[in-house]
Image (spheres, helix red, strand yellow):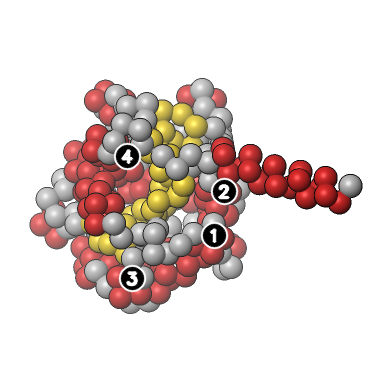
């Protein structure tokens, strides 16, 4: 009986390993409104290669999508009523440039207006308790714990594919916070630990806020974002220079998201090509 149990365990481990496809590359995306998607997507944005997939983060019956299921990565990627994000054109850029046997999957969990503290594994409740009322519906869509929701989805994704990187666009609400890089590091370290990842193989790609030349109201935050690699050796900064913004000085236009997302993709491709 004991030998039989051991054999059963070995078979189960083997079946789990077999279901994980090394050619299915998964990326986690999180942040605030620019990662959530502020611009309305257009007809051109609904054309997507089936090799680019999204793991649905919340139930959207009006879109025919169920949380925890994979679908072609047609926007919206974050929640039912969100817009275009850098993640959309990050994924498109990868599938256009990677071998045809590689599929790309993304998970997008983002809350407009939030500080990085919302993704603090230990202290998120304190942030939620003091969050403005208008932010709460978005937080509640993620079961009141966006970090935990992201991890839960990521673990489900690991049943099918391999997590290859993490995308971040957040910082507007932390503008001027010199401790932001350390706070991001805490989130990154927790993701690495909770998902049993190798930090040397899973880079963090962080995008800049709307640039000064585009009238960015939080452009001063970019000098703080630039220091992130000092805290996280495998962090890489994605420039927002020349990415079109809208009049509020906080968000990108649809064209801006396309260009920024392409730059996220190009940065990841350069990392892949370097073998790091």
Residue for badge 2: 155
Res. 91 mark: 4
Q: Residues within 10 Å of mark 4 (few under 14, many from 20)?
A: many
First in residue order: circle 1 vs circle 3? 1
Q: Secondary structure at mark 4?
A: helix
Closer to the observer: label 1 or label 4?
A: 1
Quadrant occupied by the C terminus: bottom left
Does residue 124 appear to the left or right of 48 in the view shown? Answer: right
Give yes or no for contact between labels 2 and 3 (Cβ–Cβ under 8 Å): no
First in residue order: circle 2 vs circle 3? 2
Residue 183 showing in the rendered view = yes
Q: Position of residue 126 (x, y in %)?
A: 58, 67
Relative depth, front residue between 200 and 70? 200
Residue for badge 1: 196
First in residue order: circle 1 vs circle 4? 4
Q: Position of residue 41 (x, y in %)?
A: 29, 31
Q: Quadrant of residue 68?
A: top right
First in residue order: circle 2 vs circle 1? 2
Mark 2 vs mark 1, CA separation in Å = 10 Å
Does residue 226 appear to the left or right of 1 in the view shown? Answer: left
Mark 2 vs mark 4, CA separation in Å = 20 Å
Residue for badge 3: 233
Which residue is depicted at the point 39% across and 64% down?
200
Q: Quadrant of residue 102?
A: top left
Relative depth, front residue between 212 and 4? 4
Give yes or no for contact between labels 1 and 4 (Cβ–Cβ under 8 Å): no
Mark 2 vs mark 3, CA separation in Å = 24 Å
Which residue is depicted at the point 25% across and 61% down?
237
Asked if 157 appears above or below 151 in the picture, the reply is above
Does residue 39 appear to the left or right of 50 in the view shown? Answer: left
């Amino acid at each position: 009986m004991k030998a039989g149990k051991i054999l059963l365990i070995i078979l189960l481990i083997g079946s789990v390993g077999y279901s994980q496809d090394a050619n299915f590359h998964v990326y986690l995306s999180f942040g605030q409104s620019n990662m959530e998607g502020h611009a309305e997507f257009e007809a051109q944005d609904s054309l997507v290669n089936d090799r680019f997939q999204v793991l649905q983060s919340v139930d959207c019956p009006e879109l025919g999508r169920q949380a925890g299921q994979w679908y072609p990565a047609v926007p919206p990627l974050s929640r039912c009523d969100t817009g275009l994000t850098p993640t959309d054109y990050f994924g498109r850029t990868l599938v256009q440039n990677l071998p045809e046997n590689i599929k790309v999957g993304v998970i997008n969990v983002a809350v407009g207006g939030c500080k990085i503290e919302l993704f603090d594994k230990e202290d998120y409740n304190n942030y939620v308790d003091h969050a403005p009322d208008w932010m709460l519906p978005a937080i509640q869509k993620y079961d009141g714990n966006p970090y935990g929701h992201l991890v839960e989805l990521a673990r489900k994704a690991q049943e099918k594919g391999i997590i290859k990187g993490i995308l971040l666009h957040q910082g507007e609400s932390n503008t001027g916070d010199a401790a932001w890089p350390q706070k991001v590091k805490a989130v990154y370290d927790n993701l690495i630990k909770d998902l049993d990842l190798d930090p040397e193989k899973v880079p963090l790609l962080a995008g800049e806020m709307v640039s000064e030349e585009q009238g960015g109201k939080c452009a001063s935050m970019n000098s703080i974002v630039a220091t992130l690699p000092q805290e996280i050796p495998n962090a890489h900064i994605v420039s927002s220079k020349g990415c079109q913004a809208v009049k509020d000085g906080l968000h990108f236009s649809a064209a801006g998201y396309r260009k920024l997302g392409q730059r996220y993709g190009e940065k990841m491709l350069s990392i892949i090509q370097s073998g790091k």
